[in-house]
Image (cartoon, helix red, strand yellow):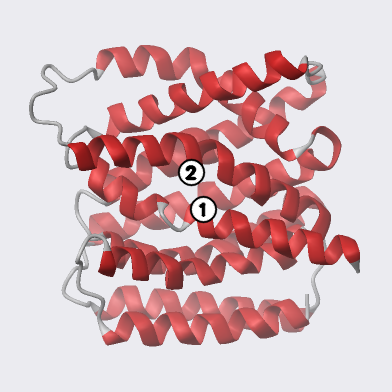
Amino acid sequence: MHSAGSGWGNGLLGVIIFSGSLPATRVAVGGFSALFLTSARAVIAALIGAAVLFLIRQARPQRGDLASLAIVSVGVVVGFPLLTALALQHITSAHSIVFIGLLPLSTAVFAVLRGGERPRPLFWLFAVLGSATVAGFALSGDGSASLSGDLLMVAAIVLCGLGYAEGAALSRRLGGWQVISWALLLALPLMVPLALLTWPSSWNGVGAPAWIGLAYVSVFSMFVGFIFWYRGLAIGGIARVGQLQQLQPFFGLALAGFLLHEPVARSMIAATALVVVCVFFARRYA
């Protein structure tokens, strides 16, 4: 019981931190290109991870862990940040946030494929119903939809679910912050040249909001959030705790509305509410 409660508590903290990711990315792409933002946030987070690994004198991962760490890097260090940054050039953060409702299903699928978990049939019923609600909302058109933006978000969700499941399974042996730190360092040889190649020709047009967005996604979205998220998934169950991601649209829509003053349609709220009902039952039958 203690482990289950700790898993849900850590997972919820991770979700709350991740909720600011898309609004912060939306602000940041107003001043930086998508490629520079993706590489810069990874480099900054990698430097933080390297400093922590050095100070604690953490042992290196085994050679057999490198493939899993590479998958984590592709999923959450490169894939999700880059694809969401590209998507947010076509859609609002409020619209993109609803796609996060697909993440629990994506994570659960990869929990079976990569983590060896076996949720019950009723779990899949409610997980699919929640995802169908999100897909229906995206296809209905809320005035801010874009086919290219929506497709980029779907691709981002698939890669993110893979990175979540793979990282959580690896966290059971290495620890949550160790996994994201090593995954960031593994991607560093690619991210540094990319940051230099996409370096802005001038910083004059970059305002304070873009800098704040970059700082948030680098420190919190790319590092701190994963400390709690991977720990929660590892000790509470990947498919089960992963359903907490369904709550992220609530937090994210609130941030998009209050901080960015983006319109939050009633259809967004209704879709999110139905998704949360689905996650309640999915959790019960996980």
- Position of the C terminus by quadrant: bottom right
Residue type of the residue flagged with mark 2: Ser
Question: 104 or 40: nearer the eye?
Answer: 40
- As helix, strand or loop, the secondary structure at mark 1 comes to helix
- As helix, strand or loop, the secondary structure at mark 2 comes to helix
Q: Position of residue 270 (x, y in %)?
A: 38, 87
- Position of the N terminus by quadrant: bottom right
Q: Residue furthest right?
A: 1
Q: Residue at x 73, y 46 (%)?
A: 168
Residue 54: which numbered mark, if any?
A: none
Q: Is residue 16 left or right of residue 166?
A: left
Residue identifier under label 1:
17
Q: Residue at x 45, y 44 (%)?
A: 80
Q: Position of residue 131 (x, y in %)?
A: 51, 74
Is label 2 in contact with label 1 (beta carbons under 8 Å)?
yes
Separation (CA) of disc 2 from disc 1: 7 Å
Q: Is residue 228 above or below residue 138?
A: above
Residue identifier under label 2:
221
Residue 235: quarter of image: bottom right
